[in-house]
Image (spheres, rainbow, N blue to C red):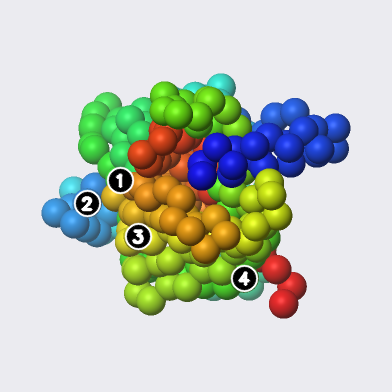
């Protein structure tokens, strides 16, 4: 049955080949988030805002007298996983004095900051303040779970490889999608039509684990039917799930009795 789904996918991809963009515009993982040293070091943290190949960082820590200190850094990374740049302390007018005069702000370089991300959710942070060097392992700080519940136009686009009894190639399980979520338990049902016009459905179920502003489903399960008959059953992961008011998307990996899959999963919210 998967070959039927595949033929349908190839036909759809060929039909839209002229109108679809040739490649995605994203340059990689977005590290924008609140990061910290984990629950064992709660109380300090660093906020990263990424725009293009630049990260602006705000670090909040404490001095020898245990009173608050905060520093800022602008780090360049060239679109990779490593960023670095000078770090500053700032002074400015009293916040309660009325109109804030930005021209009175004074930034003094106190050292430098660098961060190297080992994956989408973890990294190592190093910084120096007036000759004091600090190195920390950091991770995204999670304090809420995004809820993906809703109706979407979307599903799975992927490449099938290492296939048995069917050719490698493009997979498109995409049309209307309904997502239901209770707590962290999520189910995503995609309804579409096979090449012969038969109504088909794939159901993806798993646990949505928060990773800061992102989410992750590991060890999920899916099953598909074509014309009411069982087609394929497998497991999947969706990584770096990003949700907005208009939809959600993530990186998909999975396999079933036919193929291994790598691609994208998500959707745009329907207006209904």
Between tags 4 and 1, which lies in front? 4
Which image quadrant is residue 79 in?
top right
Between tags 3 and 1, which lies in front? 3
Q: CA distance from mark 3 to mark 2?
A: 25 Å
**Residue marked by disc 3:** 206
**Residue marked by disc 1:** 139
The residue tagged with tag 2: helix, strand or loop? loop
Percent x, y of residue 183: 35, 74
Which label's residue is closer to the chain start, 3 or 1? Answer: 1
The residue drawn where x is 33% and y is 61% is 207
Q: Nearer the viewer, residue 66 or 198?
A: 198
Which label's residue is closer to the chain start, 1 or 2? Answer: 2
The residue drawn where x is 74% and y is 73% is 271
* Residues at discs 1 and 2 in contact (Cβ within 8 Å): yes
Mark 1 surroundings: few (<14), some (14-19) or many (≥20) residues within 10 A: many
In the image, residue 36 sits, relative to residue 128, either above or below, namely below
* Residues at discs 3 and 4 in contact (Cβ within 8 Å): no
**Residue marked by disc 4:** 151
Q: Which mark is residue 38?
A: 2
């Amino acid at each position: 049955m998967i070959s039927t789904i595949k033929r349908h996918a190839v036909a759809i991809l060929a039909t839209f080949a002229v109108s679809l963009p040739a490649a995605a515009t994203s340059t990689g993982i977005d590290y924008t988030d609140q990061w910290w040293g984990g629950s064992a070091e709660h109380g300090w943290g660093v906020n990263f805002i990424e725009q293009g190949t630049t990260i602006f960082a705000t670090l909040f820590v404490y001095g020898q007298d245990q009173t608050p200190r905060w520093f800022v850094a602008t780090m360049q990374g060239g679109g990779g996983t490593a960023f670095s740049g000078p770090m500053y302390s700032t002074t400015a007018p009293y916040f309660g004095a009325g109109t804030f005069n930005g021209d009175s702000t004074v930034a003094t370089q106190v050292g430098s900051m660098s961060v190297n991300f080992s994956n989408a959710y973890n990294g190592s942070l190093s910084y120096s303040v007036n000759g004091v060097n600090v190195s920390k392992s950091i991770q995204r700080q999670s304090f809420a779970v995004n809820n993906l519940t809703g109706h979407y136009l979307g599903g799975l686009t992927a490449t099938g490889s290492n296939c048995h009894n069917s050719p490698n190639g493009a997979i498109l399980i995409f049309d209307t999608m309904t997502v239901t979520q209770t707590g962290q338990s999520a189910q995503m049902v995609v309804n579409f039509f096979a090449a012969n016009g038969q109504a088909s459905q794939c159901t993806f179920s798993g646990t949505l684990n928060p990773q800061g502003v992102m989410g992750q489903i590991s060890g999920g399960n899916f099953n598909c039917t074509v014309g009411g008959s069982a087609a394929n059953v497998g497991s999947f992961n969706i990584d770096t799930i990003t949700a907005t008011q208009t939809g959600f998307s993530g990186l998909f990996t999975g396999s079933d009795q036919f193929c291994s899959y790598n691609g994208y999963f998500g959707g745009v919210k329907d207006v209904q």
